[in-house]
Amino acid sequence: MAAFVLIDDIYNEIIPDSIKNRRNIFDCKLSDSEIITISIVEEIATMASEKA
C-alpha cells in the first residue's frame, strides 16, 4: 500500500498533460500508477512472470 501511494504521488507530478487527458482513460480497469506499482513490486519480489 505504501509503495502505491509513493508511486502514485510521483507519477501524478511528472505525467504529461497529453497522457493525463487521453481519451480512453475511463475504459481502463487499472490506473497507470497501479500497473507501475504491480511491475515494481513484482520485480522486487523476483517473480518470474506476470501470471505468477
Image: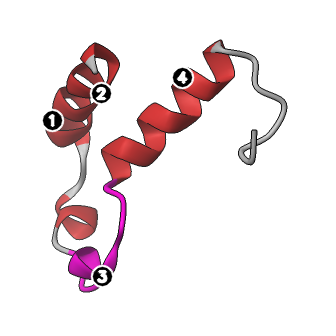
Q: Mark 3 points at which residue?
A: 27
Mark found first going from the N terminus, 2 or 3: 2
Distance in Å between CA atoms under marks 2 and 3: 21 Å
As drawn, the label of residue 4 is 2
Outermost residue to the front? 52
Mark found first going from the N terminus, 2 or 1: 2
Check if residue 26 falls in the magenta segment. yes
Front: mark 1 or 4: 4
Q: How crowded is the residue under tag 3: few (<14 C-alpha within 10 Å), some, or many (20+)?
A: few
Distance in Å between CA atoms under marks 1 and 4: 21 Å
Q: Which residue is drawn at 43% across and 33% down?
A: 37
Q: Which residue is drawn at 33% across and 43% down?
A: 33
Q: For residue 2, which quarter of the picture?
A: top left
As drawn, the label of residue 41 is 4
Where residue 32 appears, as percent x and y from the top left, is 36, 52
Distance in Å between CA atoms under marks 2 and 1: 14 Å
As drawn, the label of residue 13 is 1
Q: How crowded is the residue under tag 1: few (<14 C-alpha within 10 Å), some, or many (20+)?
A: few
